[in-house]
Amino acid sequence: MTNPETPQPVPEPDQNPVPQSTEWNRITAAALSEGSLRVDPEGLRRCITMCDEHAKNMRRMAERAREELWIESLGIGEHELESARLLIQKFNDKAVGGGKIAYESSAVGLLLSHERYALDMKATFEAVLRAYEEQEGITASALGQIGGVL
């Protein structure tokens, strides 16, 4: 059991390149099953890079929030006054989750949810780019075979 008096570490990012949210799974499936796929591969690569950078920024901000928003003391009499201790606990709960504050509503939880969203978008763009590149390879191979016959 973890000590509620200390902030918990930010969980490691999921390295799985498959979208985790149901919403992004539906978007990925739709993008790959529509039959005709027209994309700008360089645009997709830029989007993948931007999603990756955004996810990394959200991760860094979550780590900073966990470290910088957790407080041990405000110097407001928390060693003598229950109300001061409760106020500090409320601040800590809002920073990292706990008490009546759901983890998803904490600063760390919110930032990590933004990281997850960016990683889901990235995985979708990567899947579309892979499908495009695979189809391009198939088409180029087929054209090469036809050219040899002509």
Image (cartoon, rainbow, N blue to C red):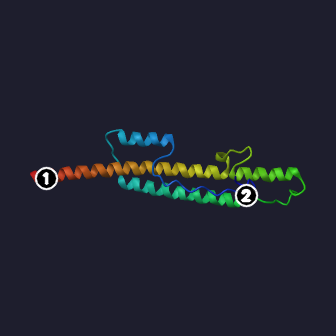
Give the distance between the C-alpha atoms of the residues marked 1 and 2, in whole angstroms. Answer: 68 Å
Image disc number at residue 5:
none
Where residue 116 sits in the image (x, y, percent)?
A: 54, 50
Residue depicted at 78% across the width and 60% down the height: 72
Camera-side residue of 103 and 4: 4
In terms of image quadrants, where is residue 75?
A: bottom right
Instruction: Point out the residue furthest to the left here.
Output: 150
Q: How many marks?
A: 2
Q: Which residue is mark 1?
A: 147
Considering the numbered disc 1 on the image, is that residue within a helix, a strand or a loop?
Answer: helix
Residue depicted at 48% across the width and 43% down the height: 24
Left or right for 91, reference 137: right
Mark 1: amino acid: Gly
Instruction: Point out the residue furthest to the front here.
Output: 1
Q: Which residue is mark 2?
A: 6
Label 2, residues with CA under 10 Å away: few <14, some 14-19, many ≥20? few
Considering the numbered disc 2 on the image, is that residue within a helix, a strand or a loop?
Answer: loop
Is 78 drawn above or below residue 28 in the view shown?
below
Mark 2: amino acid: Thr
Left or right for 107, reference 79: left
The mark nearer the N terminus, 1 or 2, is 2
Label 1, residues with CA under 10 Å away: few <14, some 14-19, many ≥20? few
Where residue 138 sits in the image (x, y, percent)?
A: 25, 50
Between disc 1 and disc 2, the foreground one is 2
Where residue 130 sits in the image (x, y, percent)?
A: 35, 51
Camera-side residue of 96 and 50: 96
